[in-house]
Image: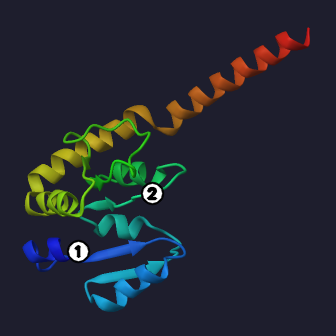
Amino acid sequence: MPLIHHRVPDVSLAIVGRRPGRKVVQLGHSWPQILVTGRVEDVRPFLAEGAVFIVPLRIGGGTRIKVFEAMASGIPVVSTSIGAEGLQVEHGHNILLADTPAAFAEAVTRLLESPATAQRMAAAAKSLVTENNDWSIVSRQFAEICRKTTLRQQGACK
């Protein structure tokens, strides 16, 4: 935040999510520009107000639904490689990836200072999600996996 704030003094950050850690909560108390919400009923208002969605994960597992959620909402995303791990994204086209604090701050600042770049990247990201991860596409793929699994199980039972 200090690196970004130095170049974009009016920047603010909303950290939205359930059970923020003690250090994250302290950030909200230390910086007036940082809002730590904890759990919210609806994340959409925060997405609607956001200029850049950041995923500064250094460790982690599980799904990366929040990245696709931001992309589908038309918000450009900056993530660490770990934060976008397993996603079919392309650095510089539909996402910016950065793994050091300086590179991460540079990527966020680049999008904040260049609305045209942010808009182009957000459009590419939204296109990626709607073309490949729309519910109608995913549900067809899931149904096909279930069909093949059932056929294999039926064949094994004979």
**Residue situated in front as seen by the camera: 141 or 158:** 158
Q: Which residue is drawn at 73% across and 21% down?
A: 149
| Residue placed under numbered mark 1 in the picture | 1
Image height of 104 relative to 19, above or below: above
**Mark 2: which secondary structure?**
loop
Disc 2 marks a residue whose amino acid type is Ile
Quadrant in the picture for residue 147: top right
Q: Which residue is drawn at 34% across and 49% down?
A: 71
Q: Which residue is drawn at 24% across and 44% down?
A: 123
Q: Where is residue 119 in the image (x, y as percent from the top left)?
A: 17, 51
Query: What is the count of numbered marks?
Result: 2
Disc 1 marks a residue whose amino acid type is Met
Q: Classify 10 Å Cα crowding around label 1: few (below 14), some (14-19), many (20 and above).
A: some
Q: Classify 10 Å Cα crowding around label 2: few (below 14), some (14-19), many (20 and above).
A: few
Image height of 42 relative to 140, above or below: below
Q: Which residue is drawn at 28% across and 54% down?
A: 99
On screen, residue 2 versus residue 88, left or right, reads left
| Residue placed under numbered mark 2 in the picture | 59
Distance between the alpha carbons at the discs numbered 2 and 1? 19 Å
